[in-house]
Image (cartoon, rainbow, N blue to C red):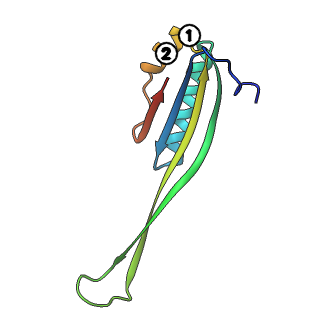
Amino acid sequence: MAEAKIQEGKQKIRIRLKAYDHKVIDQAAKQIIDTALRTGASLAGPIPLPTRRSTFTVVKSPHVFKKGREQFEMRVHKRLIDVFEPTPKTIDSLMNLSLPAGCDVEIKM
């Protein structure tokens, strides 16, 4: 974890990815990591964060038969990537990066 200990005054970019499909989020993370490494930045990640699971129970019938129910589940997968000491070329490359549809990207500097 030597990379996690950075000195004050150094710039760090934190990228959080969210998606319903784990394959999409892994593709997006791979593209971000390849771009950052190609432009000469050091990074940590992708760090898998806990998956949020929501379950919904609905009655199948519109009128009667309350025992007949259906359950649906929605999972939100999350990943975290930290880019340490990014160069201007790294920032430009990350801003122009085309990621797969269905992946939410949140960037903090």
Are the two marked residues, 2 and 1, in contact with CB atoms closer than 8 angstroms?
A: yes
Identify which amino acid the numbered label 2 is placed on: Ile
Is 14 above or below relative to 20? above
Identify which amino acid the numbered label 1 is placed on: Thr
Where residue 18 sits: x, y (%)? 47, 42
Which of 18/3 is in front?
3
Where residue 40 sits: x, y (%)? 63, 12
Which of 39/108 is in front?
108
Q: How far separated are the C-alphas under marks 2 and 1?
A: 7 Å
Apparent side of residue 37 relative to residue 55 in the rendered image (left or right): right
Q: Where is residue 66, by image quadrant? A: bottom left
The residue shown at (60%, 28%) is: 82
The residue tagged with tag 1: helix, strand or loop? loop
The residue shown at (40%, 42%) is: 102
The residue that mark 1 highlights is: 87
The residue shown at (59%, 23%) is: 83
Is 28 above or below relative to 65? above
Dividing the image into 4 quarters, which one contains the N terminus?
top right
Residue 109 is tagged as none
As drawn, the residue found furthest toward the left would be 63
Where residue 63 sits: x, y (%)? 23, 86
The residue that mark 2 highlights is: 91
As drawn, the residue found furthest toward the front would be 8
Where residue 84 sits: x, y (%)? 62, 20
Which of 32/84 is in front?
84
